[in-house]
Image (cartoon, rainbow, N blue to C red):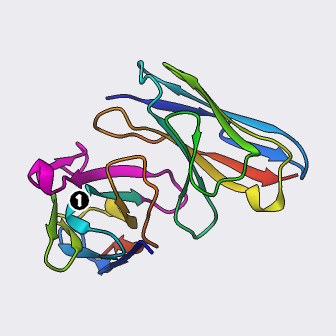
Amino acid sequence: EVKLVESGGGLVQPGGSLRLSCATSGFTFTDYYMSWVRQPPGKALEWLGFIRNKANGYTTEYSASVKGRFTISRDNSQSILYLQMNTLRAEDSATYYCARDKAPFAYWGQGTLVTVSA
Amino acid sequence: DIQMTQSPASLSASVGETVTITCRASENIYSYLAWYQQKQGKSPQLLVYNAKTLAEGVPSRFSGSGSGTQFSLKINSLQPEDFGSYYCQHHYGTPLTFGAGTKLELK
C-alpha cells in the first residue's frame, strides 16, 4: 500500500524558515518523481515543484512563486521527501501536500498546515 | 504559463441530477488534463487523467471529455458522496497549474 505522511508544519514568524518532511512507503522511492502542492485556507491548489527520479538525476523544478526561497530534496536511503522553506511570508500560509509523481497525482499525503504569522 | 479557467465556480444540484463542469486551457494541452475531487478537510483524489481515462476505483458515473483547450467533467446521477470541490489540472509540461475549482453543493 502506497503511503505518504507529511510532518513539520506549524506556526512560524514572517521571514522565518521551516522544513517539511514526507515519509513514504509501499513503493520504490527512487523510481518516482515526487511533488509538493499547497492549498491556502479556502483557496485553490497550487503546484510548487517536483524532484525527479533516479533515472533523471534527481533534478528539480519549481513554480515561479517559490523559486529561490523553497528547496525540494530527498533522502533516498530513508524514502523521505523534504521541502525547505525560507523567507516565509504570510501568503505562504497553507496546507502543504506531498504527492507521488509529477502529475497526474494518484497518491497524496494527508497534508500539514503551515501558518506564517507574527 | 498555461492558465486553466474552470467554470462554474459553484454549482447546486440534487441527488440523481447530472452535472457538467468545464475547464479551458489558455493554450493547446492536447489531452493532458486531469480532474480531482476534494472533500472538506481531505486530500484531493484523482478522478480522471489524460482527459478521459478514469483513475482506478472511480465510479463510471464520472466521465471526462475534450482535447486541445476545452474540457469537461460530467457526473451522471449524482450521489451524496459526490458533493465537494473539483479541480482541473493540466499535466503538459511545467509549471503545472490547477483551475480555481468548482464547489458542488447539495441543493
Asked if residue A82 shows in the view, the reply is yes
In the image, is B19 to the left or to the right of A21?
Answer: right
In the image, is B5 to the left or to the right of B83?
Answer: left
Q: Dot 1 falls on which chain? A: A
Residue position marked by numbered label 1 in the rendering: A31
Name the foreground residue: A118 vs B18.
Answer: B18
Residue A70: x and y in percent read 18, 59
Considering only vertical position in the picture, is A43 above or below B51?
below
Region of the chain picked out in magenta, as a range: A39-68
Q: Secondary structure at mark 1?
A: helix
Residue A112: x and y in percent read 39, 75
Asked if residue A86 shows in the view, the reply is no
The answer to if B23 sits in the magenta stretch is no
For the point 47% across and 32% down, the residue is B4
For the point 31% across and 29% down, the residue is B1
Q: Quadrant of the C terminus of chain A?
A: bottom left
Considering only vertical position in the picture, is B26 above or below B5?
above
Q: Quadrant of the N terminus of chain A?
A: bottom left
For the point 13% across and 77% down, the residue is A77
The answer to if A42 sits in the magenta stretch is yes
In the image, is A48 to the left or to the right of B71?
Answer: left
Residue A57: x and y in percent read 8, 52
Name the foreground residue: A60 vs B56.
Answer: B56
Q: Quadrant of residue A73?
A: bottom left
Amino acid on which disc 1 is placed: Asp
In the image, is B2 to the left or to the right of A58?
Answer: right
- Outermost residue on the left side: it is A57
